[in-house]
Image (cartoon, rainbow, N blue to C red):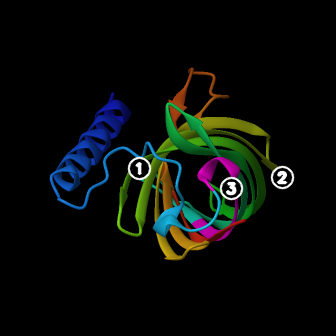
Amino acid sequence: MKYIKTLTSALVAIVLVVASVASASDFKGPAVDTSTPFGFGKTNAENWTLSLGGGGATTTTGDFQSAFGLNFQLGHTDKIIIPGEVGLRQGIGWSSTPDKSGSDWLLSTAVYQDWKLLSYKSLDVYAGGNVALGYGNTTPRWSAGPEVEARLWLKKDVYTYLRTEYNFDLNSSEGIKGQDALRFFLGVGFTF
């Protein structure tokens, strides 16, 4: 129940932020056009994105655990009701073990779909979800969950991003269970 309250609180906070930005005069509303940031280049329906970032996670309850790594992402813009992006992510990272006896090297492959919820000047905010398989020198695990990403466009084809995810363990013997960890990523991306 605690996870549902936390997730509900986060969603309410996002709605409040979007509502407050919606009242601003420069707000373009839900992104329904297919133009690129600043009106340059191809339409979003033709764009590919490539990004490289670093990320990490810290547990929110219980024994303190951390994970850090690199993340590569290849995406293609799409339009399912509103513009978005679908793609594939590959990650490599390190994680401390719960019993503090060592560490694990982790690999992950994820498929994601995010939708552009708002554009304000050179800032775009996306929300969506992902499904991932984690593997390495540990037991393979499936996970899925919601994510939110903010992109700040530095040029017509270069952006920095901050993404956070809250994934659910799909392999739990107790059913779908929250992982008690927020994952975060910071990086740079390019469109072509």
Q: Which residues are magenta?
A: 43-55
Identify residue type, mark 1: Thr
In the image, residue 170 above or below residue 48: above
Residue pointed to by mark 3:
47
Q: Between tags 1 and 3, which lies in front?
A: 3
Q: Residue 149: x, y in percent? A: 48, 56
In the picture, measured across the screen, residue 176 lies left or right of residue 5, that is right
Per the image, the residue denoted by label 1 is 61
Give the CA separation, mark 1 to mark 2.
24 Å
Q: In the shown orientation, is residue 49 left or right of residue 182?
A: right
Residue receiving disc 2: 136
Residue type indicated by callout 3: Asn
Secondary structure under tag 2 reads strand
Residue drawn 17% across and 58% down?
Answer: 24
| Residue at horizontal 28 percent and vertical 34 percent from the top | 5
Left or right of 9: which side holds 168?
right
In the displayed structure, 157 sits above or below 96; it is below
Q: Residues within 10 Å of mark 1 (few under 14, many from 20)?
A: few
Picture layout, residue 89 above or below residue 56:
above
Residue visible at 31% across and 53% down?
28
Distance (Cα) linking label 1 and label 3: 40 Å
